[in-house]
Image (spheres, coloured by chain):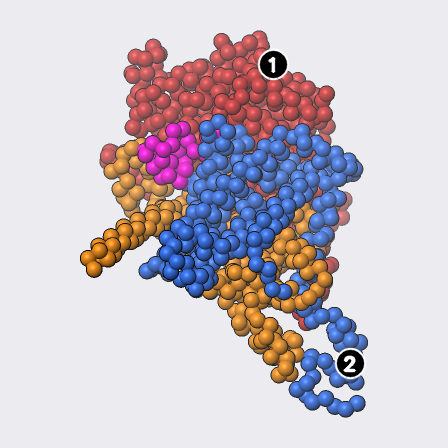
Amino acid sequence: MFLNRRDFLKGLGLGGLALVGGNIVQSKLNLTQLAYASEDDKWKQFKGSKLVFMSEDTPPTSAIKAKIQSFKDLTGMDIEIIQEHLDIVSEKVGIDVRAKKGAYPLFYSQDKPVGAPFYKHAEDLRKYASDPTFPKPTDGVGDDVWCYRFLDVTGRFFGDPKIAAYPYDNAICVMMYRKDLFEKYTKQFESEYGKPLRYTPDTTWKDVLDICKFFKKANFPDVKYGLALQGREGWGGQLDFQRFSYAHGQWLEWDFDDWFGSEKPGPCRWGDEQSILSLEKYKEVMSYCHPDTLTNDWSGANTAYITGLCAMVPNYGEFAGVVEDPKQSVAAGGRTAYELDPKGEPTWIVNGGKAVNATNYGIGGIAINRYSKPELKKAAYLFVLWATSYETMMMVLKDVGGTPDRKRIWEDPEVRKAFVRETAPMKDIEPVQMDKNDPKSIVTKIPLMTSALTFGPSEKGILPPNVVAGPKIPKFNEYIQIQTSEIHKCVAGIKTAKQACLAIKEKTDKLHGVK
Amino acid sequence: MEKIADSAVVGEWPIEQKTLFQRIQGALPFHFWLMLPTIIVLAAITIYPFFWMIWLSLHQTAMDPGEKDVWVGLGNYISLLDDESFLNGVKLLLWYFVICLSIEMVLGTAVALLINGRKGENLFIILILMPMMVAPIVVGYLYSYLYNVSFGWYFWFLKSVGFLRTDTILASAQPVLGFLPSIAFFGVVVADVWEWTPLIVLIVIAGLKGVPQDQMEAARVDGAGSFRLFRDVTLPNLRSVLLIAGILRFMDNVRYIDTIYVLTKGGPADSTKILPFYLYNISFRYFEFGRGAAVGFLLLLFIIILAMFFVNVFKKKEVVPVG
Amino acid sequence: MAKTELISRAEKRKKKIWGTVTFIAIIVFLIWTLTPLFIMVVSSFKDLREAFQIPQLGDWKGVVQFFQFSPTGRHYKELFSGGTDFTPYIVNSVVASLSASIIAVILGSLAAYGLARGRIPGEQHISFWIISCRMAPVVAVMVPLYSIFSAIGLLEASRWRNLLCLILAYTTFSLPFAVWFLRSFFEDIPTELEEAARVDGCSDFKAFWDIILPLAKPGIVAAFILCLILSWNDFIFASIFGQQAAKTLPVATAELHSTVDIQWGKILASGTILCVPMLTLGLLIKKYLVQGLTMGAVRQ
């Protein structure tokens, strides 16, 4: 009577598995010929093939997508670039590798949330790097061409020498603040606190607390809060607290190497004196911050800042683009300045460690899915080379204010000029009147490479003693839920700092099977 | 054999023409054939996943290449008893559906009673229907726009009126009055009530139109006031309608996490992490499919048991249905 | 005579007061219902910085700020231009939900009729099993469903395959609903009609098709529309099974919340667009919905 669905589907042919994640057109040259071929031929060896790249929805990927024609021209290959939220990337890659399908030959490997759990499913890029049949990118791909230890962060896990991914973009945290508001209210601040309202690399978290108290009490019409933090459940909240906890004594959750992480973390330090004190102080700072903190992640905090409700926000370099856009942001047009994250307050350190300007980040890498067909993986490596090359990163930087990972770009004199607003190359935009009541406040230009404005402080932030790269553990995603959940309970007053820390310790150790 | 008159042939083929197919067709009731496609489709889509889910729940799944799933028997289930997030999820789920359902049913019925039979009833119904047509994910974004501390109109209104004591809606994690869920939780409840009360209104209005007028007249002649009319005549006739509305809403209320996913992602402080959301985290954040399957199975059991309970409670008071 | 006049006047006044009170109550409820939508539609025409403007706390006169903006269709233009053209997503949504609802209603009405009329052993159990298919938490069944669909090859990067996958997924929850919903309609239609048809020489099927089905039309249309709404609004299934090739409108709207930028303007615009078809549909079906529910509501 009615064709039931099963029969219908069977009729369509089950053999459609040939198109698993892209397709490959074999090279016509054999390996020896390839090894001696010209660079151009090496790039074009898989001409006609098609790749798939599962990426996070970030500006570098958008820029690459817009300029993908240059990749197609260089290699003759086509590529489908999928952009999703990091959560969804994680989900889909996870489902794919568990089913061992290889539907995404290339995937975005964010160092901790995606890289650590899935590194075993990524190809070892070393074997392609030493393969003479592949073209040599400008400067190569050795450790020293990338910014300080970026290759360790994205590529090396748990003491395994394998390289799982090359650095592709980065999100380094700096402090963004309204220097115009600071200038406006410095007299009043000085009369109450005996010091000028300024933000420098020596500003400690206690100074920040004072600034927050000041703004909250004053309740000015054009700014309500001093600081917007990002306490949201998950990675946003973990990074946020880490900037605070590492600043005070360089406190780390575990004692394994922070750069490489560990598969068997062992008991954690949560519950020790320093962690409890840090959490108490963090809670105190939070109580004067923008109240939506517990529900804001980086984009929520950014919105709070660009709508003018707070005077400062620690956020990632890629947000400079939005912050500097006068159409969306009241903080544009030169009102924002960028500096290192706050230093630890020495009187809040009890573990004998140093006070540092704790800077953390997420370095995204591109990894190759080991379950794809071998030839497809080789073709995918060509994309990896192209996307992480000096030329491409420079182009992305100039286009959307990208986040390059190669030292050479950071040291380029043109780019260095863009670090500071006064010398940065600008581009014209439609005039926007920043202040309705002030006809002189018209903005007609914005910096060409907006994210470069954050490179000055970032440069120092990614070096020791300021940088904190970990914790790299396979169960990262579950750990950050536990951590942020308990921190929330402490901040909301449901648990004391001690109870929260001990709860984190108990649950985390249970998670790792530590008795 | 004598030919029977055409008009007397009742769905039976003349004996000489019966083929094997027709014999089978004749042996099974006609109505069974009608149900067959549905049963096949649903069986294909649900039976396999159901048993798979049970099978998966008895293992600890491995993500790493080369590792196999490990049999743990009831290990996953037992570990849930100890799992604070699981127990929290159950507690919040109970709060969630009890609060949402009660408000929606009472409010929906009240509005239906107010509108029924009025002048302009049609216009009111059309206007009231609108929230129902909005996708839950959009409702999430809309309310997140309205609750935002920086630019949310609802936040501004509630704070200006003085109803909201805290400085934020979505980041407010403290239990209200010490034992109720947090304000963020109620924020989610409000979004759900806004979207789905219209469904109840619609169903109840339809039911009200089915109330036998003769009963109403008889009661009025007896001198019953409007309240007694409602209690003794309207309500008994509405019972089955309320049951439909209640079960329909219940089934969706405990499954949809779209709105929570956008509004709060389960936070703050786990105060909106109802069980289905925790299930989502386990399966798709931590990739612990075994544990996820165990939670999924328990959730399904919970929903079925509750649905059966409601149906029985209502069925007892019903007139014996025909057929 | 005077006494009854007084009584009826008092009663009339009471009725009038009660009438006004209920009218006000309805208006309040309407305001509560329509305000969020109103805000969404109006804000979708505002430039971002204006969309973020709210008055100071307690500044009631400041409410006019809501209306002080220069309207711009920019967000709508952006939705349909360039690399993020929403048109294919709308098409995907329409195709997937229409197909699933049609299938659900066709198979569902057959099954509902069978359940209503047939004296099959275990009928109550089958009926309960069918409706319990709808109760399964989506997340719990997603992983096994993913494997099934993947094995059949529906998750390959091809638009029609992914659409098929979505249609199948939507049918999983539309079909049980259609069966459950329509069953009471068929139960209400008196069996005498079929007996009469049989006496006239109709086969079972013909009786069903020509006589019973038209009577149940309001219910079938109502069921179709409700299934359509549920499928159109789905997010979770589409985000996992839809893949890229068959992205639906809700998923595309969620993607506007990108990592760096919450594109509020486009989100509000997309939300408005998402509502429009369903609103128009709602207006069309209202008649059927009420009529349809009336028919079957009393029995269950």
Secondary element under disc 2, as helix, strand or loop, is loop
Please name the residue shown 66% across and 79% down the image.
C203
Residue A463: image location, x then y, percent: 56, 20
Please name the residue shown 31% across and 29% down the image.
A222
Q: In this view, does A56 lie to the left or right of B138?
A: right
* Image quarter (top left, top right, bottom left or bottom right) of the C terminus of chain A: top right
Q: In this view, does A53 lie to the left or right of B231?
A: right
Q: Which of C167 and C252 lies nearest the eye of the viewer?
A: C167
Q: Which of A484 and B39 lies nearest the eye of the viewer?
A: B39
Magenta segment includes B166: yes
Please name the residue shown 76% across and 76% down the image.
B22
Q: What residue type is labelled 2?
A: Lys
What residue did someone put label 2 on? B18
Chain B shade in the render? blue
What residue did someone put label 1 on? A272
Q: Distance between the residues labelled 1 and 2?
A: 86 Å
* Image quarter (top left, top right, bottom left or bottom right) of the N terminus of chain A: bottom right
Q: The orange chain is which one?
A: C
Please name the residue shown 73% across and 48% down the image.
B51
Q: What residue type is labelled 1?
A: Asp
Q: Which of A147 and C107 lies nearest the eye of the viewer?
A: C107
Stretch in magenta: B146-175
Secondary element under disc 1, as helix, strand or loop, is loop
Image vertical order of residue A303 relative to residue C159, above or below: above
Determine which quarter of the picture holds residue A292.
Answer: top left
Q: Chain under label 1?
A: A
Residue B13 can be seen in this image: yes
Q: Residues within 10 Å of mark 2 (few under 14, many from 20)?
A: some
Q: In this view, does B8 lie to the left or right of A237?
A: right
